Amino acid sequence: DTEVTQTPKHLVMGMTNKKSLKCEQHMGHRAMYWYKQKAKKPPELMFVYSYEKLSINESVPSRFSPECPNSSLLNLHLHALQPEDSALYLCASSQESDLRGTGELFFGEGSRLTVL
Amino acid sequence: SQQGEEDPQALSIQEGENATMNCSYKTSINNLQWYRQNSGRGLVHLILIRSNEREKHSGRLRVTLDTSKKSSSLLITASRAADTASYFCATELYNQGGKLIFGQGTELSVKP
């Protein structure tokens, strides 16, 4: 199984809502990632988890809260978002992530978020 | 500032022609990777080249890396309409494993 599964595929939320994006992989990978992608732009790194610990936070606003309950699951909790946070949120995984190198990332299809 | 810049931003060719995309970056890297993205979909890994490698092949893909010029190129030979997609280079920053930064991307259109 070489899939990364993201749910939901589409999410519409108001600025006062609390919602979560979910990501799951069963490849035994020990590193998981959240990227944000706006239309016609490259993916921007948000968070990296390595062995279930947060290893990289790219100065993401606190209204985005990541969680890694176990090595197969990655959540992104959303609260008090702004309309400019509307984007495609991509989850990815890799075998490992250490200073020497990471290797290829396997991406999910993304969750398209619209904030009204 | 951006780590990776790609050139051209858009490329339109006929089926059967070759497509070349270039990527430049600014700081030392562990490796450089190329990804493909169909519109609104997830990214698919194409090829990874390490900082001590100069050239790599995979099927119709050929990637070169020149660390002295901090640049890479992706060549797709004998293109097909199904190759139409956005192509991104991504650099993993030296000694910052996990920090994979994407370039601006090249939109490739292959006309039948």
Image (tube, coloured by chain):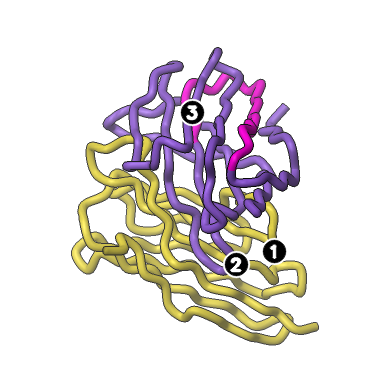
Chain at tag 1: B
What are the residue bounds of the magenta stretch?
A: A16-33
Asked if residue A79 is among those painted magenta in the image, a careful observer would answer no
Q: Which mark is residue A66?
A: 3
Looking at the rendering, in which quadrant would you find the N terminus of chain B?
A: bottom left
- Residue reaching furthest to the front: A16
Main SS category, magenta section: strand
Q: Quadrant of residue A1?
A: top right
What shade does chain B have?
yellow
**Disc 2 crowd, CA 10 A, few/some/many (<14, 14-19, 20+):** many
Nearer the observer, A80 or B55: A80
Task: Look at label 2 and name its amino acid.
Answer: Ser
Q: Residues within 10 Å of mark 1 (few under 14, many from 20)?
A: few
The amino acid sitting under disc 3 is: Pro
Image spot of residue A59 (x, y percent):
32, 42
Q: Numbered disc 3: what chain?
A: A
Q: Quadrant of residue B76?
A: bottom right
Circles 3 and 2 on the same subunit: no
Residue that mark 1 sits on: B39
In the structure shown, which secondary structural element does the residue marked by tag 1 occupy? loop
Distance between the alpha carbons at the discs numbered 3 and 2? 28 Å
Q: Nearer the viewer, mark 3 or mark 1?
A: 3
Q: Name the image quarter holding residue B10.
A: bottom right
Q: Residue at x 62, y 57 (%)?
A: B59
Q: Which residue is mark 2?
A: B86
Q: Tell me the quadrant of the picture where the C terminus of chain B can be found.
A: bottom right
